[in-house]
Amino acid sequence: RISPPRVPRVQSSPSTPFNSTPDVYELHPDIIASYGTALSGAVLAERCSAELGMTSVIIDKRDHIGGNCYDYVTEDGIRASKYGAHLFHTQHARVWEYVQRFSEWIPFDHRVKGRVPVPGAGPAGDKKLVPIPPTQETVNALFDAGVRDEDAMARWYESERVAPAHGGEPANGEEAALSRVGPRLYEVIFKHYTKKQWDKYPEELDASVLMRLPCRTSTDDRYFGDAWQALPARGYTRLFENMLLDDPNVTIRLDCDFFAHREKGTLPKHKLLVYTGQIDSYYAALGMPKLEYRSLRFEEEFVDAPDGGFFQEAMVVNYPSADVPFTRVVEYKHTPNQPNKIKKGAVRGSLIAREYSCADGEPYYPVPNPENRALYEKYAALAAKEPGVAFVGRLASYKYFNMDQAILNALEMFDNLKETGTLAPKR
Ligand code: UDP
């Protein structure tokens, strides 16, 4: 019942259909962005055009724009994401102001529930549906903590938390979690979810990974604490179309592989390459060890949900226990940017995606730990000396950026390239 993702109907311009043969050699842009129609490449192409009048060719090996943000409407009329849920949130005014230019946004406070094993109920025992990140409700439901206000919750954390034995800052994910919530919440919410997500226990990961989730003393059960939380009214793909497609300075070539062209010497001449792929792939010929990335697999199912109803209680339900093989289940109908038919409850059934983490496949996540960071530094040292190339984005900077951080990073990269004279207005 699930229709294949569709390539957007709109084309960059009648003379440059972006699904044509990937013959890019005859084009003469100022910049090219490899693998580039995701956030970083799109922001740089957009800025270079709008502020400097520079031309870009963006090549992307996929058959659609938008990178992992790509969404589409299924034959049942549900807006779904091909690469998992994307919840936009930011505290950066610059980013919020920037994204307003390309879409209307519908406020959406993302709330996640977890099906969490009740302590003592055994490996596949009873589970309760509780807010994640942990709030007063979470610890009351799981541990009968009897917490009624913020002070009591702060005292509860205080009585549970275990500071690192070395007395310093948490050195890894396990120390980070234990020093915030203590062993009981760690066991039921963090330890096994992390193992499933990364195939590593928290002690094998940087503290920062486990610090992504807030731990609340309040009753605030929102997943993010940022000032702005919203979804693009007509989806992310439309946002990318609005950024790029009507711009005569931007040419897009899909199904177009950067490495194949590099090998054949058929990349167009350019002043600057914006490289947004994996940094280790750029230097593959050097034979250095590869960086680790984590991928995802989505198992989609159209499920029965009568009378416009829902399959589950929230858009995302996490499964942090070891007995369930997936990490979370996404149900798209919950988002406020669904087409009207869905919003009115006129569609029977619902689309869900079970999310599995895996080692092979499209790279989604860098794996933040000391070994990978040390290896990345070696690649970064090469990149710093690479003339005419800007390495930007999650894969090229090997940073666990959220969407807003990727946008900010690309905007700041643009500022730097201007300041150093690498990019200059076209006369
Ligand atoms: N995490 C966890 N249990 C949860 C949710 C998150 O242990 O129920 C940990 C896990 O290590 C995860 C990290 O927190 O990788 C960051 O979670 P987030 O939801 O930010 O990950 P993303 O949405 O980027 O996959």
Image: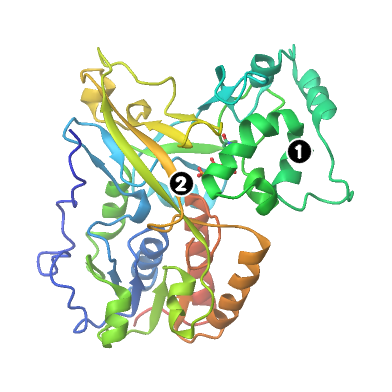
Q: Is residue 228 left or right of residue 168?
A: left
Q: Nearer the viewer, residue 370 or 95?
A: 370
Q: Is mark 2 within 8 Å of ligand 1?
A: no
Q: Nearer the viewer, residue 287 or 212?
A: 287
Quadrant where ligand 1 appears:
top right
Q: In whole angstroms, how far apart are the C-alphas of marks 1 and 2?
A: 24 Å
Q: Nearer the viewer, residue 91 or 346?
A: 346
Residue 382 % position (x, y): 55, 82
Disc 1 vs disc 2: which is toward the camera? 2
Badge number at residue 272: none
Residue 423 % position (x, y): 44, 79
Residue with the mark numbered 1: 178
The quadrant in which residue 274 appears is bottom left
> In the picture shown, does residue 114 fall above or below 7?
above
Q: Nearer the viewer, residue 102 or 189?
A: 189
Residue 391 in sight from this viewpoint = no
Question: Residue at 25% across / 13% down in the picture?
Answer: 306
Residue neighbourhood size for the residue with mark 1, other residues' Cα within 10 Å, grouped as few (<14), some (14–19), many (≥20):
many
Residue 365 % position (x, y): 49, 55
Q: Is mark 1 within 8 Å of ligand 1?
A: no
Residue 212 in sight from this viewpoint = yes
Query: Along the polypeptide, which appears first: circle 1 or circle 2?
Result: 1
- Mark 1 belongs to which amino acid? Leu
Q: Secondary structure at mark 2?
A: strand
Question: Residue at 17% across / 40% down in the picture?
Answer: 3
> In the picture shown, does residue 235 fall above or below 33?
above
Looking at the rendered image, the quarter that the N terminus falls into is: top left
The quadrant in which residue 126 appears is top right
Badge number at residue 357: 2
- Mark 2 belongs to which amino acid? Ser
> In the picture shown, does residue 38 fall above or below 140?
below
